[in-house]
């Protein structure tokens, strides 16, 4: 059975994670000996999640998630091959290990830690057709000016 890596974020419980991926808590616990108590998981832990085959024999949908801090580094990520980089004020390139041009992606503002955050806005787009493995994320302050802000980016195969 194939697995994916999932990074625990604030508010996660083992029940929520199991429900999100359609697997049982016990399956997750078997793959992750770091979990000693099903009621105690920690933000930042990277868990292996089983990905059962679907009815027609194809592997389950692939997805990646990452939390990027203001310097362009990864605070948390689901896969070590996802590589973020701040290229300019408020402009970040996030590189994936495969072509994600036809995938769905969602970028949201969010803390890289528990700190309060200023109001801001965000956009995300494909880097360019010559780089179908890059999502370009831009963050702005309330006046619409480029502004370094931590964000979450989730990309999934359709």
Image (cartoon, rainbow, N blue to C red):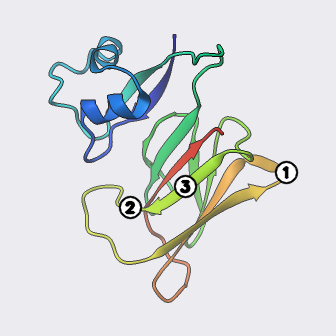
**For the residues carrying marks 3 and 2, which lies nearer the camera in this image?**
3
How many numbered discs sit on the rendered protein?
3
First-in-chain label (1 vs 3): 3
First-in-chain label (2 vs 1): 2
Question: Looking at the image, which is closer to me, 73 or 125?
Answer: 125
Residue 48 percent across, percent down from the top left: 41, 22
Question: Looking at the image, which is closer to me, 20 or 123?
Answer: 20
Residue 57 percent across, percent down from the top left: 64, 13
Q: Which residue is disc 3 drawn over?
A: 106
Q: Which residue is disc 1 drawn over?
A: 130
Above or below, comparing residue 103 to residue 139 in the picture: above
Residue 78 percent across, percent down from the top left: 47, 36
Above or below, comparing residue 132 to residue 72 in the picture: above
Q: Circle 2 sits in a helix, a strand or a loop, which is it?
A: loop
For the point 34% across and 60% down, the residue is: 111
Q: CA distance from mark 2 to mark 1?
A: 29 Å
Q: Quadrant of the C terminus?
A: top right
For this orientation, the residue located farthest to the right is: 130
**For the residues carrying marks 2 and 1, which lies nearer the camera in this image?**
2
Label 2 neighbourhood size at 10 Å, few (<14), some (14-19), many (20+)? many
Q: Which residue is disc 2 drawn over?
A: 110
The label on residue 13 is: none
Label 3 neighbourhood size at 10 Å, few (<14), some (14-19), many (20+)? few
Q: Look at the image and tell me whether residue 59 can be seen.
A: yes
Q: CA distance from mark 1 to mark 3?
A: 21 Å
**For the residues carrying marks 1 and 3, which lies nearer the camera in this image?**
3
For the point 28% across and 17% down, the residue is: 29
């Amino acid at each position: 059975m194939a697995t994916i890596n999932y990074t625990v974020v604030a508010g996660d419980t083992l029940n929520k994670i199991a429900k999100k991926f359609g697997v049982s808590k016990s399956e997750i616990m078997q793959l992750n000996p770091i979990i000693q108590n099903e009621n105690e998981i920690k933000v930042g832990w990277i868990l292996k999640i089983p990905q059962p085959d679907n009815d027609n024999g194809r592997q389950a949908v692939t997805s990646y998630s990452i939390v990027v801090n203001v310097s362009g580094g990864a605070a948390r990520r689901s896969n070590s091959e996802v590589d973020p980089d701040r290229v300019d004020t408020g402009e970040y390139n996030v590189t994936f290990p495969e072509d994600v041009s036809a995938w769905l992606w969602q970028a949201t503002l969010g803390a890289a830690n528990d700190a309060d955050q200023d109001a801001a806005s965000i956009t995300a787009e494909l880097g360019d057709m010559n780089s179908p493995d890059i999502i370009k994320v831009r963050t702005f302050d309330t006046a619409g000016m480029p502004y370094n802000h931590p964000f979450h980016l989730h990309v999934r195969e359709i």
